[in-house]
Amino acid sequence: MNDPIFEVERLSLAYPERRGQRVAPILKDVSFTVERGHALTLVGPSGSGKSSLLRCLNRLEEPTAGTVHFDGRDIRALDPRRLRRGAALVMQTPVVFEGTVRDNLRVRPADVDGDLSEARLGQALADVGLEGELLERDAVTLSGGEKQRVTIARALLGDPRALLLDEPTSALDPPNAALVVETVSRLREARGLSIVAVTHQPELVRRLGGMLLYLVKGEMQAYERVGDLDVRLQAFLAGERAAGAGDAS
Amino acid sequence: MSAAVIDLSLPQLALALLLVAAVAIVSIRQALGLERDLLLGSIRTIVQLYGVGLILAAVFAAARWYWVGLILVVMTAVATHAAVSRLPKPIPGGYGIAAVALFVSTGVTLAYVIGAVVQVRPWYEPQYIIPIAGMILGSSMTSAALGGDRLQGELRVRAAEVETRLALGFSGREAMQPLVRSALRAAMIPVVNGMMTVGLVQLPGMMTGQILAGSSPLLAIRYQIVVVFMQAAATALASLFFVRLIASRYLTPAHQLRRYLL
């Protein structure tokens, strides 16, 4: 297999210097590859730069050094709006807009077309384990877990090639977390979707397979195949589970 | 007209100062601790207004376009500083943005009012252009400050919403638009509401002044109507430029939100 969807080379990120504040390094010399249709999970203590790394992949952050290639092209050569439709980001804290769930699923730039029929919206909800009648509901009245799944459905409706997930199960109780783990793994297999996920959930790491990147203070500590993780990473994941699986930290 | 005005002598002004003395007595008896500020405020009122009065008297007497121009530039600079210093969070290039917003909104409105509405000839007649410019700048400054304050407040609360739209493929401008709209409404609502009650609750200051100076109330209200409309226009223009330009400072050409500025 040698068909990368993401190729990241020596990526660094720092916030610019400002009055009274020194340059704050966030990521240092991070390199990895994500094969098409495969997964990469990002793990590490909080504040290690996992979310920032995810945000570099769809260019919500501008790396200070290094390159990111998406589908063979340097992302700086792509229109960021197209890149973000190709690599859809689901944020840790779900944001729903005013209006119904239907309105939320139909949110997209005016110049972008695509199938947003009732049948497809219903299917998108079913894919994340939600009932079709939820379409009528006012989105702000949803529970945290429902909002999270609506935002995943909204991302999938744009037909992305890659899905970037920032702790997709952190807002969910164990049964719903299991459901999202199941959904995401199934989508990867069924649609050949590439997935980069920040997660604390050993279950999600195992189900997604692929590679695992362990970050501490913005530096790569390990980059290994999920099938044969070394003792240290197994201990880290076990610790995460002991701290409460699916718990945001 | 001016023959109807009662001259105010210095002893008469001194009598007015007794009003402040009354305030000082209240402050002392109620232990408000405002005497010092009251004294300073009274001195500043006298010194600042006399200073402005002397400058205006000189400019009125000279009636040269460049002196009038200089006064307008100084007024705009002071208003720019006031609008920027009222931003809760400083932003790079804030002064330039405020200066552009106030210069354009005041320039356009002032040119229209002086040239087309009141038809002042020559255009730099200080008696007209300086007070009118002052009123326009005052409205521009207040609305710019209100709009900027609201936009920064919205950004702090709604940054994730903006980035969610960006992540869905919206342009920076589209992603920011709901916040810009709410900032513009906040900047313009006071003026629109003011138009509903103007003259019913309180007579506007300029109209009061004209009446005191001997103008007929009917002429005074015509001027006041022009003032209300020109303040509305200046408010809209200033907040539009200021809020839009500030919003653009928070975005990059690659449709990114500069989070480190929040």
Image (cartoon, coloured by chain):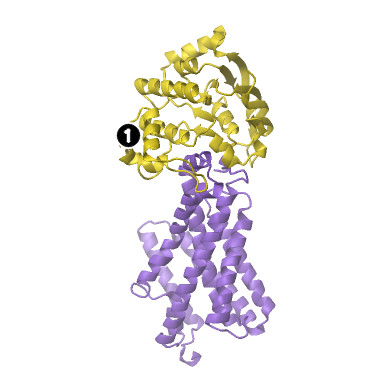
Chain colours: A yellow, B purple
- Given residues B99 and A30, the one toward you in this image is A30
Between residue A147 and residue B92, name the one nearer to us: A147
Of the pair B8 and A2, the residue shown nearer to us: A2
Is A194 placed left or right of A172 in the picture? right
Q: Is residue B90 above or below residue A48?
A: below
Note whether B121 is above or below B100 in the view shown: below
The residue singled out by tag 1 in the image is: A132
Q: Chain of mark 1?
A: A
The quarter of the picture where residue B71 lies is bottom right
Q: Is residue A247 visible?
A: no
Q: How many marks?
A: 1
| In the image: residue A177, left or right of residue A193 | left
Quadrant including the C terminus of chain B: top right
Please tell me whether residue B198 is drawn above or below residue A137 in the rendered image.
Answer: below
Q: Residue at x 52, y 81 (%)?
A: B117
Amino acid, disc 1: Gly
Q: Is residue A98 above or below residue B17?
A: above
Mark yes or no: residue A228 visible. yes
Estimate the x, y position of residue A238 in percent, counting from the top left.
47, 11
Q: Residue at x 64, y 57 (%)?
A: B96
Is residue A19 toward the left or the right of residue B14 in the image?
right
Q: Label 1, secondary structure: give it.
A: helix
Q: Residues within 10 Å of mark 1 (few under 14, many from 20)?
A: some
Q: Quadrant of residue A15?
A: top right
Task: Please tell me which residue lies in front, A118 or A147.
Answer: A118
Q: Could you say where residue B260 lies in the image, as x and y percent from the top left? A: 58, 40
Q: Position of residue B79 (x, y in %)?
A: 57, 63
Q: Residue furthest top?
A: A231
Query: Residue B32's quadrant in the figure?
Result: bottom left
